[in-house]
Image (cartoon, rainbow, N blue to C red):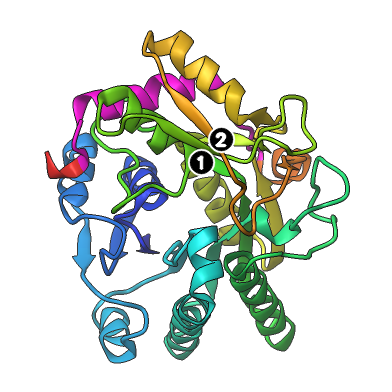
Amino acid sequence: MSILVTGGAGYIGSHTCVELLDAGFEVIVVDNFSNSKSVVLNRIESITGKPLKLYAIDLLHREALEGVFEVNAIEAVIHLAGLKAVGESVDNPLWYYKNNITGTLNLLEIMNKYKVNKMVFSSSATVYGASSSVPNSEDSPLKANNPYGRSKLMIEEILGDLYRSNPDWYISILRYFNPVGAHESGRIGEDPHGIPNNLMPHISRVAVGRSDRLSIFGSDYDTPDGTGVRDYIHVVDLAKGHLKALEKINRVSGINYYNLGTGRGHSVLEVIKMFESVTGRNIPYSLTNRRPGDIDKCYADPTKAKVELDWVARKTLSDMCRDAWRWQKNNPNGYEG
């Protein structure tokens, strides 16, 4: 079975490709390398011992994208490609809406033309916004409070309209919480371009000496220690969730929504303490102002994924820190090294 993975060279995409190849799927990657590097594909192949196809294509380039469907017998799509930084989306909302939504529309129209009607979509817990209560279930109110989250929510609504217009579509929408960690081989991990927007790569870069100290954005949140609380999930657990969702859409038509998280929240200071404990590295930090668009706390109720997908997150925060450090220690300059 041939699976197209958009954004397959990215952090989540690379780990998902490993799981797909190990499970016996043929993998076709489309990626524009705006926040990834081509060398990751070689590492995926070395980990799995299996080849994949790569097309260096932007989803906004419709003709090039259609060419991929013309020459490959694609049976399903895992759609991960998209801009994903909350703060950047606040500064540049038009670019986020154009890239994330127009790219998805191009993909869906081409899928429709070539009668490829199975999709696993990478959404986000940001669609819940600053929820009045946690944990968030799939039935919690949707009220994204930044352009990144709203772009994900708009795409969810587009997919809902698409299914209602044609119930022959098979769609799983996965609402990610906060992916961290790396593959246990230490060969692939999170290596964002420029200054990281997420916590764990910041911590890892301080630990390896690429940065002097960590900035903690906000210390006055309504949480036990004043720092933001998130549901951190190991990226390998997250990748395995895509395979479970793929199994679901291969059996049953419809549109379904699933939280992928551990069901437990950890504060920024808790993550730092765990990282120091696991690695023996000291992480200096300073407290600074909140970032626009950030919220106090967010963690999942993952019950539905357990019941309907037979999926649970198995790795602990200790595992996440250990694997993130192994990746960074083995690759102090990321993929550039």
Which disc number belongs to residue 179?
Answer: 1
Element type where label 1 sits in the image: strand
Amino acid beneath label 2: Ile
Q: CA distance from mark 1 to mark 2?
A: 5 Å
Q: Residue at 34% of width from left, 23% of height from top?
A: 325
Q: Residue at 85% of width from left, 60% of height from top?
A: 141
Examine the rendered structure and indicate whether residue 20 appears above or below residue 47.
Answer: below
Examine the rendered structure and indicate whether residue 249 appears above or below residue 132.
Answer: below
Task: Please tell me which residue lies in front, 127 or 260.
Answer: 127
Residue 121 quadrant: bottom right
- State the predominant SS element of the stretch in magenta: helix
Residue 262 percent location from the top left of the image? 66, 32
N-terminal label among 1 and 2 = 1
| Quadrant in which the C terminus appears | top left
Task: Please tell me which residue lies in front, 136 or 17.
Answer: 136
Q: Is residue 315 visible?
A: no
In the rendered image, which residue does mark 2 sit on?
233
Residue 53 falls within the magenta-colored stretch = no
Residue 74 quadrant: bottom left
- For the record, the magenta segment spans 310-334
Residue 194 percent location from the top left of the image? 29, 52
| Quadrant in which the N terminus appears | bottom left
Amino acid beneath label 1: Pro
Judge left or right: residue 287 versus residue 165.
left
Residue 94 percent location from the top left of the image? 51, 82
Question: What is the crowding at mark 2: few (fewer than 14 residues within 10 Å), some, or many (at least 20)?
Answer: many
Residue 69 percent location from the top left of the image? 32, 80
